[in-house]
Image (tube, rainbow, N blue to C red):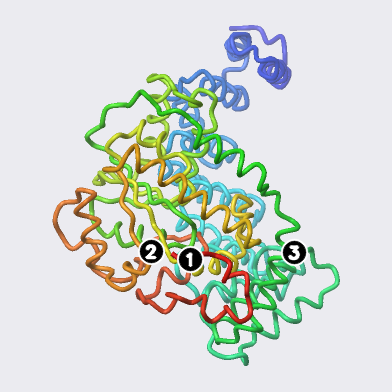
């Protein structure tokens, strides 16, 4: 029997200090000794799992955490540590299963902060149905918590449950002053189409603008909400007034830099060709849907994903993140491309699409990295969505984006620059990869959706079948982009040449060459 010389928490402090100093080997040795004295210490075993994971021993780390949860299913710290590790491996469904199982075992169901932590983790895993279910369960236990209602409203909107989303957003606004800062007004306006100015939201949004303690960001969102509401009912002059106010404020707040954008684009255009190219995998083909936001990327991806061999992953962040790594700059070595491709494929495949072969990534701004994408995946298909320039510019200007990467959308000069650079880069990539890129025009897609998608599916190589059986997104899927309402409606051409309604009020549109 070993003699205890130090308390477990003292050993743990030593391990944490060693890890902070980058002494992974010393930390492993310290843990091994500490566990001989305290073999039952949950904190030390959890630290052991973390050290194993950092050393790339994921199987061993997972085994330790699952053993801890087997003995204590309500161990939140171990469950969340395991879920985060699984998420980093692209095993999103497994991560969600761990979180949900732990919450079911947790005796105190009134812990709102725990529920919110779980909701945010599930959202990071893109498991919206699970996140919504946790929010709903938490509301049953904490019916007056406005934060939970705001989260529930967001997920219900993304899942197409618009009536329920509206109830949650209104509850949050009525019961907590902070809800005006939680994107609730913009969520309300995005979850429906207004038919007349008598709707109560018009008064609600106007009253919100009179609030004294509102942040500039929340005030801008209210203007966008009112602009959208007036646009719905055809009051274009009123809509313009609010869109101008919202864009002016948002433009002041954004950190998006025209100088940085130009520097990045010129670097991409000046880069020499990538000489190395990996082999096609045979069982994994990415379909990258690129172009300007608001050009039909969400609609097209949803229609393509009707095919049973296609999995739509929405807007994945991984291409931009990988492109920013120094090892992939310039003309990357084959081994670096292989590691990057493996990382991307892991996060695109995940653990819930065993029957899929084609995986859609509809991050529009990936048009910046087409050369890298095709070096990693030579059989990838690049679908370039294009739309009339004035309609694109207007639609961007009418959106309140939550991501600062879209900060150019608040100024017509910046919008024109980004659209022009998109075309410059696409022209360059077409010169090098003419057979891998296909352009789909928004106007053709909404006029002839089945024909357009069927022709595209044939080019991609999908097995023959009706690739677009219906004309709207399946209600079980989630949409977290600005198109969450529009993409669920039957395909229509009402937005074609929409800019003409605004031409008398937005003269900047006439300075954009129409394509």
| Badge 3 density bin: few <14, some 14–19, many ≥20, Cα 10 Å | some
**One can see residue 174 in this view:** yes
Q: Is mark 3 on a helix, strand or loop?
A: helix
- Residue 261 lies, in percent from the top left, at 61, 44
- Residue 198 lies, in percent from the top left, at 62, 92
Is disc 3 in contact with disc 2, using a CB cutoff of under 8 Å?
no
Spatial CA distance of label 3 from label 2 is 30 Å
- Residue of label 3: 249
Q: Which of marks 2 and 3 precedes in the sequence?
A: 3
**One can see residue 108 in this view:** no
- Tell us which disc is closer to us: 3 or 2: 3
- Residue of label 2: 299
Q: Which of marks 1 and 2 precedes in the sequence?
A: 2
- Residue of label 1: 483
- For the point 71% across and 61% down, the residue is 250
Spatial CA distance of label 3 from label 1 is 22 Å
| Badge 2 density bin: few <14, some 14–19, many ≥20, Cα 10 Å | many
- Looking at the image, residue 318 sits to the left or right of residue 213; the answer is left
Q: Is mark 1 on a helix, strand or loop?
A: loop
Quadrant of the drawing holding the N terminus: top right
Is disc 2 in contact with disc 1, using a CB cutoff of under 8 Å?
yes
| Badge 1 density bin: few <14, some 14–19, many ≥20, Cα 10 Å | some
Q: Is mark 2 on a helix, strand or loop?
A: helix
- Corner quadrant of residue 212: bottom right
């Amino acid at each position: 029997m070993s003699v205890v010389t130090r308390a477990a928490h003292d050993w743990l402090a030593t391990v944490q200090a060693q890890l902070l100093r980058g002494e992974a080997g010393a930390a492993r040795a310290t843990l091994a000794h500490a566990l001989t004295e305290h073999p039952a210490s949950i904190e030390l075993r959890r630290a052991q799992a973390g050290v194993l994971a950092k050393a790339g021993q994921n199987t061993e780390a997972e085994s330790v955490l699952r053993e801890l949860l087997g003995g204590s299913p309500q161990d939140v710290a171990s469950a969340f540590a395991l879920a985060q590790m699984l998420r980093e491996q692209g095993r999103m469904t497994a991560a969600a299963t761990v979180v949900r199982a732990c919450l079911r075992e947790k005796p105190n169901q009134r812990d709102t902060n725990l529920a919110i932590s779980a909701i945010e983790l599930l959202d990071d895993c893109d498991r919206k149905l699970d996140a919504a279910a946790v929010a709903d369960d938490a509301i049953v236990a904490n019916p007056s918590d406005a934060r939970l209602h705001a989260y529930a409203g967001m997920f219900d909107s993304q899942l197409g449950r618009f009536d329920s989303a509206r109830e949650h957003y209104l509850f949050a606004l009525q019961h907590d002053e902070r809800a005006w800062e939680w994107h609730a007004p913009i969520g309300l306006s995005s979850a429906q189409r207004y038919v007349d100015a008598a709707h109560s939201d018009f008064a609600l949004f106007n009253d919100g603008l009179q609030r004294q303690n509102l942040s500039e960001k929340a005030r801008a969102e209210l203007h966008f909400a009112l602009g959208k509401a007036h646009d719905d009912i055809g009051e274009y002059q009123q809509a313009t007034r609010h869109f101008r106010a919202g864009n002016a404020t948002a433009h002041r707040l954004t950190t998006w830099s025209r100088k940085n954008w130009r520097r990045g684009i010129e670097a991409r255009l000046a880069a020499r060709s990538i000489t190395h190219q990996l082999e096609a995998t045979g069982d994994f083909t990415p379909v990258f849907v690129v172009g300007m936001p608001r050009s039909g990327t969400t609609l097209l991806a949803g229609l393509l994903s009707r095919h049973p061999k296609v999995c739509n992953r929405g807007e994945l962040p991984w291409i931009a993140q990988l492109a920013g790594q120094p090892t992939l700059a310039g003309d990357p070595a084959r081994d670096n491309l292989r590691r990057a491709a493996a990382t991307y494929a892991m996060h695109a495949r995940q653990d819930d699409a065993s029957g899929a072969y084609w995986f859609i990534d509809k991050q529009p701004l990936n048009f910046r990295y087409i050369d890298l994408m095709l070096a990693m995946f030579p059989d990838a298909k690049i679908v370039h969505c294009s739309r009339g320039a004035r309609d694109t510019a207007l639609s961007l200007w009418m959106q309140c984006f939550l991501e600062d990467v879209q900060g150019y959308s608040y100024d017509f000069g910046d919008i024109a620059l980004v659209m022009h650079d998109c075309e410059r880069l696409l022209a360059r990539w077409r010169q090098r990869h003419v057979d891998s890129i296909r352009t789909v025009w928004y106007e053709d897609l909404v006029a002839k959706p089945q024909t357009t998608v069927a022709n595209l599916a044939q080019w991609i190589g999908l097995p023959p079948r009706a690739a677009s059986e219906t004309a709207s997104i399946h209600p079980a899927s989630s949409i977290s982009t600005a198109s969450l309402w529009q993409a669920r409606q039957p395909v229509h051409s009402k937005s074609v040449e929409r800019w003409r309604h605004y031409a008398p009020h937005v003269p900047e549109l006439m300075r954009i060459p129409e394509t």
